[in-house]
């Protein structure tokens, strides 16, 4: 599978977002389309127009890091967009590879023990396709609508993207649904840059593109997101409104798998902490029953 189309569309979309004024170039009077022209990006990057045109057509595999840096600077890419561009270049060098179904990597038992030991934060592990791989009890209770969704039952595993775009109840659960939808697609777009040969990822993107117009529009924007942190606002069916801080940390697993540990925590002393505590008390596992025997007399 080649990624030339992704390279072309990503670079063209970033070029379209810039105006000559933003990069210190004179404004022309006859611009038929918004954004910079290819020759203007070439000037800013210090390369010929012919060379940059070839690059924007997807011929990126043999390009040096120095030149990629120059292009990234010319297009004013942020750190995550720059990383994505470098991922596209890296995978372009192996574009002859066929799509493969990556083997799922089992989490080491101590990771599940760690999750279970966390009681006042919802903790879960997800892979790059946004499948939920493991959770603690509070994470399952917090995301109960997703785990109860038909999108989970149909595939045997909860997936944030499927739930977000294919289950109408997600619009009630996620208060900031639009922002969450954009972040979800941007995370998948970054994973596609890292792993363009992942067959399961291609199938997921194809499924969502077929069934959701919102997904198709966001996917075409070529926005990327690698860091995953911020504020999440939820309307939980049992405890009501929740505003939680969340942060994801990459877990050191196999080099062929991306697993993130995500933690959702409420600010101390707020009503949201009280709601989370209530949810935690409901989801806490029952103490193990122990058999008793009378002492010998």
Image (cartoon, grey):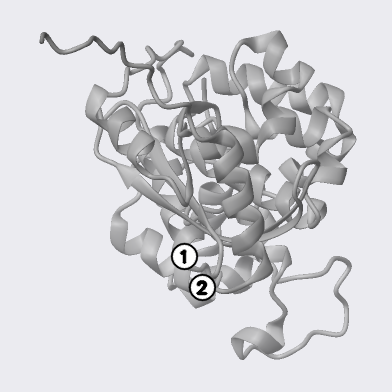
In this rendering, position of residue 67 left or right of residue 124: left
Q: Secondary structure at mark 1?
A: helix
The answer to whether residue 60 is seen in the rendering is no
Residue 102 location, quadrant: top left
Q: For the point 15% across and 13% down, which residue is it?
A: 295
Q: For the point 52% across and 20% down, which residue is it?
A: 1
In this rendering, position of residue 131 left or right of residue 134: right
> Which residue lies under the disc numbered 2?
74
User: Vertically, is 62 above or below 154?
Assistant: below
Q: Secondary structure at mark 2?
A: helix
User: Relative to the observer, which residue lies in front, 121 or 177?
Assistant: 121
Q: For the point 45% across and 60% down, which residue is it?
A: 82
Q: Residue furthest front?
A: 297
Mark 2 crowd level (few <14, some 14–19, many ≥20, 10 Å Cα): some
Disc marking residue 236: none
Q: For the point 30% across and 63% down, which residue is it?
A: 66
Horizontal and vertical percent position of residue 267: 55, 69
User: Relative to the observer, which residue lies in front, 163 or 56?
Assistant: 163
Horizontal and vertical percent position of residue 249: 37, 50
Spatial CA distance of label 2 from label 1 is 5 Å
Mark 1 crowd level (few <14, some 14–19, many ≥20, 10 Å Cα): many
Residue 165 location, quadrant: top right
User: Relative to the observer, which residue lies in front, 157 or 183?
Assistant: 157
Horizontal and vertical percent position of residue 245: 55, 63
> Decide: marks 2, 1 in contact (CB < 8 A)?
yes
> Which residue lies under the disc numbered 1?
71
Q: Quadrant location of the C terminus? A: top left
In this rendering, position of residue 226 left or right of residue 37: left
The answer to whether residue 144 is seen in the rendering is yes
Horizontal and vertical percent position of residue 73: 46, 73
User: Relative to the observer, which residue lies in front, 250 or 100?
Assistant: 250
């Amino acid at each position: 599978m080649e990624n030339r189309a992704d390279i072309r569309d990503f670079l063209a979309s970033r070029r379209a977002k810039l105006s000559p004024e933003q990069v210190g170039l004179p404004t022309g009077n006859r611009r038929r389309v918004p954004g910079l022209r290819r020759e203007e990006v070439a000037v800013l990057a210090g390369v010929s127009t012919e060379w940059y045109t070839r690059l924007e057509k997807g011929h990126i595999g043999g390009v040096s890091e120095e030149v990629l840096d120059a292009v990234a600077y010319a297009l004013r890419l942020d750190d995550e967009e720059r990383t994505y561009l470098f991922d596209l270049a890296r995978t372009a060098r192996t574009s002859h590879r066929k799509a493969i179904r990556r083997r799922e990597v089992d989490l080491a038992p101590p990771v599940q023990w760690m999750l279970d030991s966390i009681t006042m934060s919802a903790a879960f592990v997800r892979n790059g396709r946004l499948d939920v791989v493991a959770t603690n009890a509070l994470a399952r209770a917090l995301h109960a609508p997703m785990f109860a969704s038909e999108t989970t039952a149909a595939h045997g595993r909860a997936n944030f993207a499927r739930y977000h775009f294919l289950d109408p109840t997600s619009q009630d659960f996620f208060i900031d649904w639009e922002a969450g939808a954009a972040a979800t697609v941007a995370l998948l777009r970054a994973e596609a840059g890292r792993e363009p040969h992942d067959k399961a990822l291609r199938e997921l993107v194809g499924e969502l593109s077929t069934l959701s117009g919102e997904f198709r529009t966001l996917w075409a924007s070529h926005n990327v997101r690698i860091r995953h942190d911020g504020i999440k606002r939820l309307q939980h069916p049992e405890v009501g409104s929740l505003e939680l801080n969340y942060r994801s940390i990459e877990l050191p697993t196999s080099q062929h798998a991306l697993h993130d540990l995500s933690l959702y925590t409420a600010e101390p002393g707020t009503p949201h902490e009280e709601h989370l505590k209530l949810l935690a008390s409901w989801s806490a596992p029952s103490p193990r029953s122990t058999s008793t025997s009378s002492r010998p007399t």
